[in-house]
């Protein structure tokens, strides 16, 4: 990964490809690479769908090596949804393949005139950009089917569905899993619309003839990786809970804790929760001949995913994750796993973020477009998005826009991005992350649920404001670093509790790069990434007034805890003081 | 006293999802955990009335205790 390829889609005479040394980005990866390139090269005041914005695709520091869990891919740009800098990451095969091909980043810039649609083929022989208008408005599943006919099954695909082509602000970029299904999405922030604005429909990553990336010290690397894997297998969350039940094990947890946002954040308990829980889902998947344990990329030893079949045993979708089960389930008053799996498939196919889409449907329900709990109604609304009707384009623009168009007062967004599946009133720590992360409301940016609710990595009372700022700060710093390594964030459960597993990760980095990184160095990297991102947002016009939850979280208590978000503004403003 | 016990995830295997059981007055959460043969080192979250509780917590008539192994997601 010592080079960067730059594709200028707007060059006179057609797209132009140039390759340059990775230079100052050598040895970095993932979120560090995308955010630093965006911070340096993109004018923060540009229009996110204009020629000045760039789409940066970067494998993690350890992607493409033999290291376990190292297949996260980061995509960065200025977000059309939030107007902030954006890093959105996904699993799937893309990061490993891109790492092996040897690019530290692909930078897609400029914007072609006309409405030709392009595909980009990346291999060790170089990068080819070709017009292929036969792909126009294909959604992800039929698109990948068609591309497989031409490029086969030994490659990884990244693609946008119709939503990305239509420049919808909820549009995602899909990455294929080991079975070549377009199920792993860089979901958040409308990154698919940025790819669509550059008229790039698909990227084919072909690593034939490429070897695994070689560590500086192969023996030490193998050794550290072995300890790392042992640690993951030993911890009950990564070794037992996630493989057996997936992330949806959280439905019952959050429901019991009274922090499960129900019917557009009007209650903290969903009476239908048990029916859509991870336990119920795993049982159903196994009974129907699907699978409750599946890895989104080769080399994942946790395997939190699964396969969801219908009652006749036919594939419906990959196992919907907790966030999706919530957004299309409890948030909309829907307690049916079949409906949720169908919506998950539709989202993956159209190419929209499942969180943004589900939250939007719930906001539309508040507006009266259909009733809470109306399964068919929810499907109809998402079908509008698939068809690209005027209503579908509004919904595909996300919860914030939909709320405005239909005059909804209480819309759960921060920086115009939908809140995920944890209510910040009874879980104050996650509220601090929602409010302050440079990404717009995002749970992964500083997953305070671990410490507030799950009691992993410490214990901070979720109902009180005390300790939440420090918790969120430390988690945001650690996450920014992990997002740069290419490691799946779920390793955090094990490394927060087991110092030797954290050390194994650091040893892997050092053995691979021949460096002397310490835990302090990891923290420094996280801080550096956050600083670059905050600086971009400031230059884009964001102020501390944007680092707040919507007002109603401060004024409207909800059952069962009947309390509001009570972390003070002064405290929120101190999250990034270090 | 009558209590409702809810078990989750791996703790359900070979046991139950939800059950009403009779316990002696003054029974603590820890005693219930031991009576159900739940390995203490695998305990994650213990909740009564949507609030986290500790093993020493004394249960009261009619309450519901939710017991989770260590779990995570996100
Ligand atoms: S734990 Fe889940 S999200 Fe993470 S790499 Fe494995 S399958 Fe993908």
Image: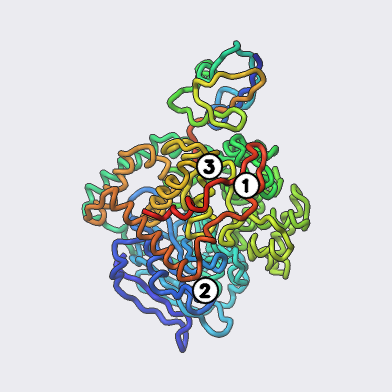
Point out which mark residue A326 bears: 1
Closer to the eye: label 2 or 1 = 1
* CB at disc 2 and ligand 1 closer than 8 Å: no
Secondary structure of the residue carrying numbered label 2: strand
Closer to the eye: label 3 or 1 = 1
* CB at disc 3 and ligand 1 closer than 8 Å: yes
The reply to whether residue A298 is in sight is: no
Q: Disc 3 marks which residue?
A: A246
Q: Chain of mark 3?
A: A
Residue A327 percent coordinates (x, y): 63, 50
Residue A477 percent coordinates (x, y): 39, 52
Lower position in the chain sequence, tag 3 or tag 1: 3
Q: Disc 2 marks which residue?
A: A200
Q: Which residue is painted at 42% across and 41% down in the image?
A: A493
* CB at disc 1 and ligand 1 closer than 8 Å: no
Q: CA distance from mark 3 to mark 1?
A: 14 Å
- Colour mapping used in the image: rainbow
Circle 3: is it few (<14), some (14-19), or many (20+) Cα within 10 Å?
many
Residue A487, above or below A82: above
Q: Nearer the viewer, residue A186 or A119?
A: A186
The reply to whether the C-beta atoms of the residues labelled 2 and 3 are less than 8 Å apart is: no
Q: Chain of mark 1?
A: A
Q: Nearer the viewer, residue A499 or A560?
A: A560
* Rendered image quadrant of residue A34: bottom left
């Amino acid at each position: 990964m010592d080079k960067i390829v730059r594709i200028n889609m707007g060059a006179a005479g057609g797209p132009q490809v140039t390759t340059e040394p990775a230079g100052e980005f050598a040895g970095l990866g993932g979120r560090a690479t995308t955010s630093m390139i965006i911070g340096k090269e993109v004018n923060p005041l540009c229009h996110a769908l204009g020629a000045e914005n760039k789409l940066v695709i970067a494998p993690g520091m350890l992607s493409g090596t033999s290291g376990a869990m190292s297949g996260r891919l980061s995509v960065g740009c200025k977000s059309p949804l939030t107007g902030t800098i954006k890093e959105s990451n996904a699993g799937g095969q893309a990061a490993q393949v891109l790492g092996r091909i040897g690019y530290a980043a692909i930078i897609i810039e400029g914007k072609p005139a006309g409405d030709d649609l392009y595909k980009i083929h990346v291999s060790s022989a170089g990068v080819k950009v070709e017009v292929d208008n036969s792909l126009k408005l294909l959604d992800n599943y039929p698109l990948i089917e068609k591309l497989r006919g031409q490029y086969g099954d030994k490659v990884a695909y990244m693609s946008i569905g119709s939503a990305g082509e239509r420049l919808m602000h909820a549009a995602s970029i899909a990455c294929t899993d080991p079975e070549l299904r377009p199920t792993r999405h860089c979901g958040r922030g409308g990154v698919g619309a940025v790819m669509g604005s550059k008229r790039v429909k698909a990227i084919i990553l072909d690593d034939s003839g490429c070897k695994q990336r070689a560590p500086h010290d192969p023996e030490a690397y193998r050794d550290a990786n072995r300890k790392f894997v042992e640690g993951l297998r030993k911890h009950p969350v990564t070794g037992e809970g996630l493989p057996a039940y997936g992330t949806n094990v959280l439905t019952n947890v959050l429901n019991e804790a009274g922090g499960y946002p129900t019917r557009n954040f009007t209650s903290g308990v969903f009476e239908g929760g048990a029916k859509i829980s991870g336990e119920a889902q795993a049982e159903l998947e196994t009974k129907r001949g699907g699978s409750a344990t599946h890895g989104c990329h080769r080399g994942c030893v946790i395997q939190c995913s699964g396969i969801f079949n219908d009652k006749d045993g036919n594939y419906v979708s990959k196992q919907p994750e907790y966030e999706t089960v919530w957004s299309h389930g409890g948030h909309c008053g829907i307690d049916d796993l079949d409906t949720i799996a169908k919506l998950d498939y539709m989202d993956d196919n159209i190419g929209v973020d499942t969180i943004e889409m589900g939250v939007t449907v719930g906001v539309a329900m508040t507006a009266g477009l259909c009733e809470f709990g109306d399964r068919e109604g929810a499907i109809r609304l998402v079908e509008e998005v698939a068809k690209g009707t005027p209503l579908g384009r509004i919904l595909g623009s996300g919860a914030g826009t939909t709320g405005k168009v239909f005059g909804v007062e209480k819309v759960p967004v921060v920086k115009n991005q939908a809140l995920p599946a944890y209510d910040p009133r009874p879980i104050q720590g996650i509220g601090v992350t929602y409010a302050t992360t440079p990404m717009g409301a995002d749970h992964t940016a500083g997953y305070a649920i671990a410490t507030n609710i799950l009691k992993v990595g410490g214990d901070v009372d979720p109902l009180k404001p005390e300790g939440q700022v420090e918790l969120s700060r430390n988690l945001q710093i650690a996450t920014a670093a992990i997002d740069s390594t290419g490691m799946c964030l779920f390793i955090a459960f094990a490394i927060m509790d087991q110092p030797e597993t954290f050390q194994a990760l650091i040893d892997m980095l050092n053995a691979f790069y021949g460096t002397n990184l310490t835990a302090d160095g990891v923290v420094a990297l996280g801080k550096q990434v956050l600083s670059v991102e905050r600086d971009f947002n400031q230059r884009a016009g964001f102020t501390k007034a944007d680092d707040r939850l919507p007002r109603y979280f401060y004024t409207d208590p909800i059952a069962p805890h009947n309390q509001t978000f009570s972390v003070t503004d002064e405290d929120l403003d101190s999250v990034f003081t270090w | 006293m009558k209590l409702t016990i809810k078990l989750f995830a791996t703790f359900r295997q070979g046991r139950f999802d939800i059950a009403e059981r009779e316990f002696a007055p003054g029974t603590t959460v820890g005693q219930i955990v031991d009576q159900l043969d739940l390995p203490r080192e695998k305990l994650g979250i213990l909740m009564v009335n949507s609030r986290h509780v500790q093993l020493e917590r004394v249960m009261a008539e009619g309450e519901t205790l939710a017991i989770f192994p260590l779990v995570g997601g996100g």
